[in-house]
Image (cartoon, rainbow, N blue to C red):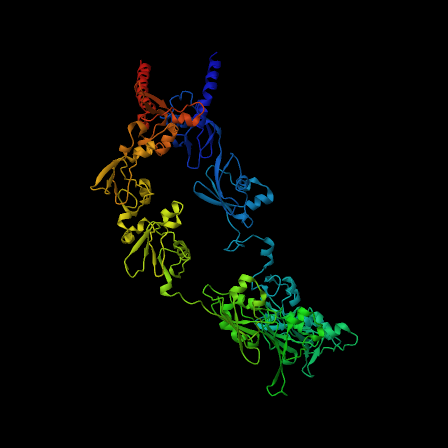
Amino acid sequence: MIRIFCLLILFICSPLLADNTITLTAGDRIFLFVPGEKAFRDDFTIDDNGKIQLPEVGTVSIANLTIQEAEQKIKQKLSSIYLNLNDFKLTLKEQLIRIHVLGYVEKPGTVSLKPNSNIQLALAAVGGARPGAQLDKFSITQNGTSRQFNYKKYLDTGDPSSLPTLKNGDTVFVPVSPLLGNIEVDFDAAAIQNTGDANERDGLTLFGEVRNPGTFSYKPEMNVVDALMRADGVTHHADVTKIRVITNNKPYQFDLKSFLDTGDESLLPPIKPGTTIFAPIEVDDINTTSRTVFVMGEVKAAGPYEIGKKTRFIDVLANAGGPTRFADTTQIKILSETEAPMTINLVEYTKSPHTYDIPHMKTGDVVFVPEKATVSEKSWLKITEDRSIKIIGAVNVPGRYEWSPAMDFMDLLAHAEGPTKRANLSNIRLILENEDLDNGHDVSFFNLQNFMKEGSPKRLLPHLSAGMTIIVDELPDDPSDNKASWLRQSPKDSIYIFGAVGAPGRYAFNDEQGFLDILSAADGPNKEADLQDVLITHRNGQRTTVSHLNLANYFETGNENLLPKVLPGDVIYIPQTTKPKDDKSVMVIGSVKGPGRFNWNKRLTFLDIFALAGGPSETANLSSIRIIKKNKNDPNSIIYFDLEKFINRGGNFAALPTIRPGDTIMVDELPSDPSDNKSTWIRQNAEESIYVFGSVNAPGRYAFNEQLSFLDILSAADGPNKDANLQQIKISHRNGSHANVTTLNLTLYFETGDETLLPKVVPGDVIYIPQRNGDWLDKPANRVVRLMGEVKNPGRYSFNNQMSLLDLLAEAGGPTDKAYIEKIMIVNSSCCGDKSQIFSLRDYITSPSETPIPMLRPGDTVYVPNEEDSTTSLLRQGLQDAFSFVTTLLVIGAAL
């Protein structure tokens, strides 16, 4: 019985003994059982510093503690936040070891491994060693002591005894291979091996135009060719005829091409350990042999080429890739040291290759393929005078072009991309040098315009010859260009127009145009033109004649017979109407669109004169237009006319003032804007003004009439500003025998809309809007809601039935960070006494459908308390005191 009892005691106490022997280390995974707390559902892992992060507590260091010691320490930390910890329990879920893997690995860092894990598992956890790591010199640091081990031996044999045993906190370092340089590049084992397998003293060094330069091991039976093959041979850029070899400090030049052609081993230079071989690039010097010809110019691959005894010109040209698209294949030159230059026309050769003689090539010959002349080519030196033709003037691409007997005039014009839109096609000049003539050249003219209209045969085109110059004159671009371009226009193709026209000048003219055409080209007659007496000077006959034209009569009747026939060389003059005389004119000045002096006649009324002046401007004062009469008996007489009243009442033409010659109509101007009062008040009649002072945005002196009201003049002053006292507006009425002052409550008008509250103001009155002392006076208590407590902008807010408590809080900027939003208090004022209610904003946020928003009415008071005043804070403080009292009682009871 005693034995069974002892075994039972041992079974019960064994977990407790295990908890006292197991020590927690970094990487261990534990579980904390806290009933009812969601934050403790997941496991906690001890970090490298031996700490865990607990909710609402922070970090707790539990490394190197037993399970029981760690449980007591964590429970003590949690007891200040959580009350019910009777069932708290710490359970070790998994115990791991933490290994630091550093050096040339994919992802260096700290990894968590199960106990008894080896080096290979630690490397696998960090992604393995990188290509280029030195596997035979790994090092491990345990308890501050470092030692090396051969990981490569383990990979070769699989013997785990060559690997050290890992312990918690060990550091494994993977070094990099010395074959890698100081600058890291992608590892390529084959490339490292191919760069050489020997040093400079015992090997052969090859560089230059070889495929794989480096220092390679030497073998006694090797020659230069073997050494070049060890470097994978030469590149296609290498000059194989001038390979340099240095053996025992003595230079040799090796011609690989001659050796391969002859097989003579005597051409091979000696090589020994330490020999240096250099293959130069072919472009470093001129490559000349006893069988070389040269190809230059517009070919695909210019350069030297080797020939045989029966190599022909066409073979060399083909070997050079043939001519490019820019080559002039009709002028290919063959230059020889012993014979005269020869010209090859490849176009003729392609037409009949059997009859065209193609020479054989000789050593040292030079084949030159010239570049053909193009339209965009600016250099004229490439085309000689005996095969060129020039076209200048109004063509799209003027220049010097290659000439051919098969070319006609239309071919040349098309080659120059045709005439421009301003080209004078009726008079094209063709100039040909002729030493037999006195002036040294022959000039002919060609009318291309008639040629195209009549569809003339091709034989009527002018004959072209080498050395000819063709000039296409240009018409003026526009009438304003006449002065700058009149020299380029022939006088026999021009007509002259002067006087009262929009653009007088000298214009191109032909037989197909008429009088109206030339008048339209000059932008037509202007407003000052006298159309009843147009003068035309005809200069095309033996003597000059002048005809008269009543153009106004033509416009009224449309009779084409009235229009004269004009020809190039004629002169058209349109005179200007006589300026109005002072005794037969009326002057209009002031705020009209076109002030000036206007001819007067008996049929003109005041409105006619006003219309001739362009009508009033936007700022004209139409209520007080002055007519200054020119009367010998009474020179100072002035008549005032209210045009605005005339227009508003429908207009009685009998009431219009009578206008006589010499009268002056003066239209005053209103101020441009309120800010312009200071500079224009002198121009404004005091009898038509009203004054606004005080708290308005633009106080000043404003024009006023009978159609305007109090609100109009208040709007002209940009309305009251934010500091205005709208309940105490003062109006001084000065239109009577003595001043009378009235008071206006404009706030009451805005609330009721009663027009009878607005006073009647007339010119001369003074309006004064005083400044208020406090904003709260304008808001009665029964029309506002008071908001106090922890909000960003407490105060009195205007409120209506459409707003809720949330609108009020948003208007005040919302609660502050210290607000206790679970207990917002609302005091409602009613007929039966004040009532209070509590609203939880947090409950509304979490479940809005279940939390009603209390109703607010004007006059209510809302208070948002501070979180320090919350019941929870007060209760928590009380519970702490009560908990201390209960703990004391329990200790006393245990002692008893």
Farthest residue to the top: give it. 1
**Can residue 287 be seen by looking at this rendering?**
yes
Q: Residue 630: image x %, image y %? A: 31, 60
Which residue is nearer to you in this view: 732 or 133? 732
Q: Residue 225: image x %, image y %? A: 66, 66
Left or right of residue 2: residue 473: right
Vertical side of 287 occupied by 206: above or below: above
Which residue is nearer to you in this view: 260 or 331? 331
Left or right of residue 742: residue 122: right
Q: Residue 103: image x %, image y %? A: 49, 47
Identify which residue is drawn at 79% across, 75% down. Answer: 354
The quadrant in which the C terminus is found is: top left
Which residue is nearer to you in this view: 271 or 608? 608
Q: Residue 739: image x %, image y %? A: 21, 41
**Can residue 792 be seen by looking at this rendering?**
no
Give the quarter of the image for residue 778.
Answer: top left
Give the quarter of the image for residue 448.
Answer: bottom right
